Amino acid sequence: MPSPLSPSRYCVVALLAPMGVGDRVPRSAWPAHVTLASNFLADASTAELVEILRSTGAADEAMTFRLGDVAMFGSQHDIAVRLVESARAIHLHGLLTDRLEKLVGFAADEPAHWRGGFRPHLTLGPAVCAVEGEMLRSTRVGIARIDGAEAELVAALDIE
């Protein structure tokens, strides 16, 4: 369980490719996913984060995403993404934000990309190929813990 002196870094994603709880991947080679809440620090247990996901209804219905334009993210504008159109992703982000920001030790890595600055996206990379206009569907929402250059899926909810 995290201690108040060392919060963990997390993100919340809609999974588009197989990934099991406990899987660790280099952040540069994430399987396909749409970010619902970008990297944040919090002194929270996995159980607390799962309860937040459940309370938002994130696992109540599948999510569909229409892929849009390519954009460059990151502090150096060196991370290629495809923006996605999804009213549900924007709605879930708002619900998640309301709850996540109340966690002990909460701090968003990039606050400008939360709330009004949120742009749902699919990060591109060697493991992800996506075409503008393509429709994607997610039936699983996950929580990943970010540890340096790696990410570990610590929880996932199948969408019923």
Image (cartoon, rainbow, N blue to C red):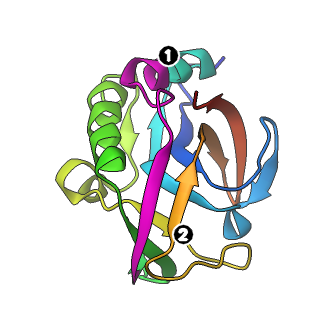
**Residue type pointed to by label 2:** Thr
Task: Tally the numbered discs.
Answer: 2
Residue position for label 2: 123
Give above or below for 4 relative to 41.
above
Q: Quadrant of the N terminus?
A: top right
Where residue 30 is drawn, which disc sits there?
none
Q: Which portion, as a residue range, is magenta?
A: 51-70
In the image, residue 133 lies at what x, y percent? 43, 78
Q: Quadrant of the C terminus?
A: top right
> Does residue 14 appear to the left or right of 105 in the view shown?
right
Work out whether residue 34 or residue 73 is closer to the camera in this orientation and state it.
34
Residue position for label 1: 51
Q: Secondary structure at mark 2?
A: strand
Work out whether residue 57 or residue 160 is closer to the camera in this orientation and state it.
160
In the image, residue 49 lies at what x, y percent? 52, 24
Q: CA distance from mark 2 to mark 1?
A: 26 Å
**Residue type pointed to by label 1:** Glu
In the image, residue 106 lies at what x, y percent? 38, 32
User: Which residue is located at x 70 percent, y 61 percent?
Assistant: 31
